[in-house]
Image: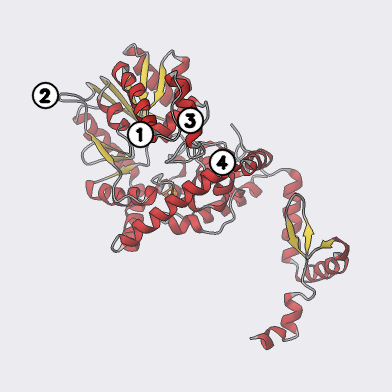
């Protein structure tokens, strides 16, 4: 997929015209935002904890190779099989191979952005394995043949009515949209059979704890636990940046993740997988595979973009972003949307392919303010824009326009001359106090006297 400027504009325009989507986005993002603010207000020393977490993440990424090796050693000692995947193709091939070896026909999946990133469902389907999403939001999106539109709430764009229609089709009988317990009970019954029939469970992982070789999974639905414990075989895919050297660091991570994501002191389920089931265990997978995914991450280490690897995928930056809140997740054309998506998508999948995304931001800074790791996304958006200019990624017309603007803005006299000229000719174009700039937009006309003229005349001083 790509996201050029015109593609982003087209998708965003469709989203903005969709009243149902706008209402769903407004409600969900506002609820998340308020819950997050409240949770942080109640957390003693929240700001100090965020600073502490940032320094921990910085230090961990500084020694990433060492922590990954420790994780691999401990995970193997616990009985897990660890695989390294340089890119998505390698990760898919590894997982397909495991499925084939065990003659898996049905796999149940817990929520995982990394599997979205590598298009794992498609690869499994091509290999004859049906992969069923078990997170409610992800399942609805799969039934609708769409892609997730929010990092933690994949079906944020779906209304209750649409959810009921999709589930009714799957159940083969009409389900009431206004009876949420009935809807979830029907979904649970449909899903239960799949858990029991599946030959393989697949999940992501929120944290890889190096000191014990454990994977931590954070979910709000019981599906994560079912997917990791019912099938006899489990495969977890996790990005290499998700390592915490110690449980102490993981504890700070967890304290901030639930609060940032949905205003919860802790998510409803925090599951820990350390190796496969022991002989005496009543349940759990008999075989556990962990696939460590690079896919462009190690390329960012030691660069001006390393900071983006500190992200814990809480989704808080999406909920405060004025662009995401209007355009919705699908406009980005990537599994990662919103401010974090606008930065990480071009870095992982190519600046040329996603040239629009560094511009999908007002640079208001709300994402940085809300981020539990204080990731400076606006700085990286500006860096990406500069890279686009340097690599001549932008279309010729846009590049020339920006070069002309830079030339004028750097030239004091030319700037004064042009703004004076514009002031003289703008009259016929100004209507009802504004300049029409296409569509519904109206730009204010230039003020009768410029700031410099007012300054030179001492008018600003008089106003004080
Ligand atoms: S950038 Fe920060 S706020 Fe956004 S998803 Fe990542 S950790 Fe959360």
Secondary structure category for the residue under label 3: helix
Task: Tell me the colour scheme of the image.
Answer: secondary structure
Query: From the viewer's perspective, is the residue at label 1 or at label 3 nearer?
Result: 1
Q: Residue furthest top?
A: 103
Upstream in sequence: badge 4 or badge 3:
4
Report how far apart the C-alphas of labels 3 and 2 lie in the structure.
38 Å
Element at badge 4?
Answer: helix
Give the label on residue 141, or none.
3
At 74% from the left edge and 83% from the top edge, which residue is drawn? Answer: 456
Q: Nearer the viewer, mark 4 or mark 2?
A: 4
Q: Is residue 462 left or right of residue 157?
A: right
Q: Which residue is mark 4?
A: 21
SS at mark 2 in the image: loop
Cα separation, mark 1 vs mark 4, equals 23 Å
The nearer-to-camera label among 1 and 2 is 1
Q: Look at the image and tell me whether residue 150 can be seen.
A: yes
Report if residue 339 is visible in the image: no
Question: Of label 4 and label 2, which has the lower sequence position?
Answer: 4
Left or right of 418, for residue 199: left
Q: Earlier in the sequence, mark 3 or mark 2?
A: 3
Between the C-alphas of marks 1 and 3, the distance is 20 Å
Q: Quadrant of the N terminus?
A: top right
In the rendering, which numbered label is found on residue 181?
A: 1
Spatial CA distance of label 4 from label 2 is: 50 Å
Please tell me whether mark 1 or mark 4 is closer to you in this view.
1
């Amino acid at each position: 997929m790509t996201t050029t400027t015109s593609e982003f504009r087209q998708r965003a325009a469709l989203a903005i015209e969709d009243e149902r989507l706008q209402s769903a986005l407004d409600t969900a993002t506002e609820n998340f935002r308020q819950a997050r603010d409240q949770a942080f207000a109640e957390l003693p020393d929240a700001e100090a904890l965020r600073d502490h977490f940032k320094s921990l993440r910085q230090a961990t990424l500084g020694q990433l190779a060492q922590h990954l090796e420790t994780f691999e050693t401990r995970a193997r000692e616990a009985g897990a099989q660890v695989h390294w995947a340089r890119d998505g193709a390698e990760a898919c091939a590894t997982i397909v191979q495991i499925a084939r070896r065990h003659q898996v026909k049905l796999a149940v999946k817990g929520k995982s952005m990394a599997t979205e990133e590598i298009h794992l469902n498609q690869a499994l389907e091509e290999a004859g394995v049906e992969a069923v999403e078990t997170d409610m939001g992800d399942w609805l999106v799969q039934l609708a043949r769409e892609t997730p539109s929010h990092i933690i709430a994949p079906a944020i764009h779906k209304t209750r009515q649409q959810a009921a229609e999709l589930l009714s089709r799957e159940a083969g009988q009409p389900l009431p949209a206004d009876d949420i317990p009935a809807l979830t009970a029907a979904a649970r019954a449909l899903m239960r059979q799949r858990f029991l029939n599946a030959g393989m469970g697949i999940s992501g992982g929120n944290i890889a704890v190096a000191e014990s070789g454990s994977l931590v999974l954070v979910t709000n639905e019981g599906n994560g636990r079912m997917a990791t414990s019912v099938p006899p075989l489990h495969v977890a895919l996790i990005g290499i940046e998700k390592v915490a050297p110690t449980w102490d660091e993981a504890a700070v991570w967890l304290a901030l993740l639930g609060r940032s994501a949905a205003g919860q002191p802790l998510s409803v389920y925090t599951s820990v997988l350390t190796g496969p089931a022991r002989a005496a265990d009543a349940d759990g997978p008999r075989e556990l595979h962990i696939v460590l995914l690079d896919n462009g991450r190690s390329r960012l280490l030691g660069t001006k973009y390393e900071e983006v690897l500190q992200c814990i995928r809480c989704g808080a930056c999406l909920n405060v972003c004025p662009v995401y809140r209007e355009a919705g997740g699908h406009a980005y054309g990537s599994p990662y949307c919103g401010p974090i998506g606008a930065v990480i998508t071009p870095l992982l999948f190519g600046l040329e392919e996603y040239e629009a995304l560094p511009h999908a931001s007002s640079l208001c800074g709300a994402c940085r303010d809300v981020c539990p790791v204080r990731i400076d996304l606006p700085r990286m958006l500006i860096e990406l824009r500069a890279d686009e200019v340097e690599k001549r990624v932008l279309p010729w017309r846009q590049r020339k326009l920006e070069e002309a603007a830079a030339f004028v803005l750097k030239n004091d006299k030319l700037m004064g001359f042009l703004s004076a000229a514009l002031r003289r000719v703008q009259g016929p174009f100004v209507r009802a106090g504004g300049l029409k700039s296409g569509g519904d937009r109206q730009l204010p006309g230039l003020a009768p006297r410029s700031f410099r003229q007012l300054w030179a005349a001492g008018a600003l001083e008089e106003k004080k």
